[in-house]
Image (cartoon, coloured by chain):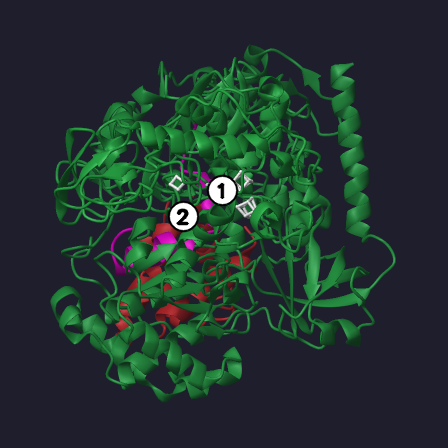
Amino acid sequence: MNVDKLIRMANQIGSFFEAMPDRPQALQDIALHIQRSWDPRMRAALLAELDSRPGTEGLTPIVGEAVRTHRKSLEGSP
Amino acid sequence: MNQLVDIDYGTPAKPAAEQVSLEIDGVAVSVAAGTSLMRAAMQVGIAIPKLCATDSLEPFGSCRLCLVEIEGRRGTPSSCTTPAEAGMRVRTQSPRLAALRRGVMELYISDHPLDCLTCAANGNCELQTMAGVVGLREVRYGDAGANHLDAAKDESNPYFTYDPAKCIVCNRCVRACEEIQGSFALTIDGRGFASRVSPGQMQPFMQSECVSCGACVQACPTATLMEKSVIEKGQAERAVITTCAYCGVGCSFKAEVKGNEVVRMLPYKGGQANEGHSCVKGRFAWGYATHADRILSPMIRQTISDPWREVGWDEALAYAAGEFRRIQAEYGRNSIGGVVSSRCTNEEAYLVQKMIRAAFGNNNVDTCARVCHSPTGYGLKQTLGEAAGTQAFKSIEKSDVIMVIGANPTDGHPVFASRLKRRVRQGAKLIVIDPRRIDLVAGPHVYAQHHLKLRPGTNVAVMNALAHVVVTEGRLAEQFVQARCDTDSFEQWRQFVARPENSPEATAAVTGVPAEEVRAAARLYATGGNGAIYYGLGVTEHSQGSTTVIAIANLAMATANVGREGVGVNPLRGQNNVQGSCDMGSFPHELPGYRHISDGATRALFEQRWGVTLQAEPGLRIPNMLDAAVDGSFKGFYCQGEDIVQSDPNTQHVVAALEAMQCVVVQDLFLTETANYAHVFLPGSSFLEKDGTFTNAERRIAPVRKVMPPKAGKADWEVTMALSNALGYPMRYRHPAEIMAEIAALTPSFAGVTHERLDTLGSIQWPCNAQAPDGTPTMHVDGFVRGKGRFLITQYLPTDEKVTRRFPLLLTTGRILSQYNVGTQTRRTENLRFHDQDLLEIHPHDAEARGIADGDCAGIESRAGSTVLRAQVTERMQPGVVYTTFHFPESGANVITTDNSDWATNCPEYKVTAVEVSRVAQPSTWQKARQRFTDQQLALLVRARS
Ligand code: SF4
Ligand code: SF4
Ligand code: SF4
Ligand code: FES
């Protein structure tokens, strides 16, 4: 999958939830949104990118944190 | 069989108020106060002669044929204009009345050609019928005197003629155009004997303000205004009630048929969505169904440069199934997927998603709602709890303030627009939020109190500013919110919108809307009585589409404008059955009834019924499928009735994806742009060729009935079934009613829906179940579907698609009345005469700065691609914004649009693309390449047939 696009999509999701006052809830909602709307191969590609370029993959801080905190829920069989 | 001619009660029904009892010709009758004597009489089967009255129009009282005698009163009042009163004793027949009526008829006939035998209305002419009814036997005034018998016909309209020689000046057409359509295109020109009906200033119909809705033709009692199809084919033999297959209004029609041929389509007055009205598309643009371009034989080929080979159904299906299975064996179960058509029936949509989930064994299924109203589904589900609009169209009759956001109903949803305009003429206030000055802003006898002419892409900022005014000026419906909504989420939202950065003054810089206009509009909506919001793709097709939908729901809840008639949040949905295809589980993450695929209990229900194990993970959406194809992990695609090459954004990316696939199966009526990239073509069937149901924007499930047998031998549901069987997953439905029974058994909101119930009730708005056996016109009445209404914070974020020095203008896209979507159907009708190319609308300043004059070729370039269109210089546009439609494939509007999309649903951002426009002399490189490719593909088709 075009990983730049995936990162852009994830960041867009993050920017909606970033406005929520309850940060742990926002982190969970970001991960949940990705989990409930992305096909497993898209999630796997995102996680692979995160693993190969941790910190420089281009995710915004809140999305990076959400994905790391809730990584388990995002792993599916590709 | 349905009646060809419905009972005409002469005047409209009055709302059931106090009843009055009277006697007509000795028969006792009880009617609602205010009902005309004519209608009261018809209610007990007494047909009073009439010419200028018909029950779709307010009475006019001009023909004097409907005279009656009332005991104790002098004279002979006209029964169409006289209200029934308690205790009246009315006589409809007497020698005096008979003589008066004969006299009236004699005058009419003396100036009317006596060519009844060869007249197109023969057998269906009210003048002829009345002459018979009143017993006219002679006309004493010969045709030697002044008459209109030689008046010239106006045949300019492609669908109907106007023959003034036959006009009896009953005014029904004029009133229909005003009262029903709201176009005010007709007048009676001249006085007395000289008077005649006139479009505009005595212009031909085609040059007037007429929008060809046909309401006048239907109202005309004679052959003066007459469908050309009836002139050509004669009167019909039978009628079938069915539903329009164009837009999401879902008008009910009576298809008048002779043999297997449609003679005309008449909007059905019993239809609850349209109450007897229609637009030019549904009423007239049905000729595509029998167009010579229809492909009626299955075809296959190995590569897209091979000639097509016409084959039998079995061979085509076996080839498609074999290829899909081969691909899955090689690249994995998830390497194929498909698209459900939102033009097909609910039953067909259900079958396609079932086939994909059960026979393909994955969840790679999506529908065109992805590219239109997927944000509506998401936003309304998050806030109100149900992924659909809250009202019936009729609800607008009780609205006091109507807010139209990002929609252009007079073009996109014309029959709804007529209802809206009628309500505004009655005094409701209108607020329009749109970058363009759409027709509603200032139309005949309708104008918007406020037009918030925002910059494209700033919807969220405007909605937040409206909410800011409501919150900070103390115009909240606190009691409603306390009782009905989640108060924690409300408090957070209240604090958020109250922030100074959300004030109209602060947002004006980005939105371009003066703060005072926003404040006034907010006050009007919050305090003007019943406030209803109607919105369209101008809301959803943005990177913040879902956020705007949420903001709309927030505003409606905060002002208590949800849960009763006259209010609500109403998406104007595009395709005839896009609501239905979403309801039927066409999204990769949702089973029918919007239940998430990860929900084990729901999955178990389907698994048991379907006899398979379902994947619990969401599948790919259309744009993800295309990305995965380019990436190499998606290789096979079943595309039912969609033309993604033309309709989806970034055409060159869509084409690259299709070219990367190994088996593309297209099921359609015509060789579409997408079919040019297909390996298997399966002929589709039009809405006239099958049974089933469509669900419109009001959640109204309405019957689609077969008028003629499928031209290629199979209806679409039969094709899907055959493909599934070829894949080894058996489906054995004998009729779509059996499919609906399965849907009802598995989907709580459809539990009470059957084809029989639809036959009885006419249509049903879901949810329809034990609690609401006749359906649900208004949703969220006593509580929200999700329990407590939930507010969400809607932070405005500018789109990434920004104007730059290189691309200094914003392109936004839309639709035009006469063409429908990618135009596959309407381009194959006479509607081409109204609009034969997509134009680039541009403000005079922007045009002048670029040396572009009206009609010049204008090159449009974005970071995605470039194309060339003719320019239309117009002040409808604001400076800095250009606009086009995408009805013609050669226009390439989507070559320009980018793959930016809504954050929640990937709905493309069609409404904002940064572009530059310049004057050019020839088509773009893309256009030339497309023409070459299309010519090659047509040659390959010709070879298949030779
Ligand atoms: S076709 Fe419709 S718009 Fe045109 S004159 Fe008749 S009623 Fe008016
Ligand atoms: S055109 Fe038809 S409806 Fe109109 S005034 Fe003449 S007869 Fe009546
Ligand atoms: S308004 Fe829509 S549904 Fe009604 S006739 Fe026109 S296209 Fe068909
Ligand atoms: S029908 Fe009543 S006056 Fe014409």
The region drawn magenta spans B360-386
Which residue appears farthest toward the right when viewing the image?
A: B921
Label 2 vs 1, first from the N-terminus: 2
Q: Describe the element under mark 2 as helix, strand or loop.
A: loop
- The chain letter for the residue carrying disc 2 is B
Badge 2 density bin: few <14, some 14–19, many ≥20, Cα 10 Å: some
Label disc, if present, on residue B242 of the rendered structure? none
Instruction: Look at mark 2 in the image and give the residue it sits on.
Output: B60
Tell whether circle 1 marks a residue whose Cβ is less than 8 angstroms from ligand 2: yes
Query: From this viewpoint, is residue A52 visible?
Result: no
Q: Which of A57 and B919 lies nearest the eye of the viewer?
A: B919
- The chain letter for the residue carrying disc 1 is B
Relative horizontal placement of residue B501, taking residue B75 as reference (left or right): right
* Chain given the colour red: A
Asked if both marks, 2 and 1, belong to the same chain, the answer given is yes
Residue B331 belongs to magenta span: no
Q: What residue is rendered at 26% in x and 36% in y?
A: B603
Residue B380 belongs to magenta span: yes
Q: Quadrant of the N terminus of chain B?
A: top left
**Residue B481's spot in the image, x, y percent?**
17, 70
Q: Colour of chain B?
A: green
Residues at badges 2 and 1 in contact (C-beta under 8 Å)? yes
Eyeballing the image, is B378 above or below B811? above
Instruction: Look at mark 1 in the image and give the residue it sits on.
Output: B170
What amino acid type should be assigned to the residue bearing mark 2? Phe
Q: Quarter-wise, where is residue B288 in the image?
A: top right
What amino acid type should be assigned to the residue bearing mark 1? Cys
**Residue B805's spot in the image, x, y percent?**
71, 77
Eyeballing the image, is B181 above or below B933? below
Q: Quarter-wise, where is residue B119 in the image?
A: top right
Q: Which of B707 and B155 lies nearest the eye of the viewer?
A: B155
**Residue B312's spot in the image, x, y percent?**
60, 11
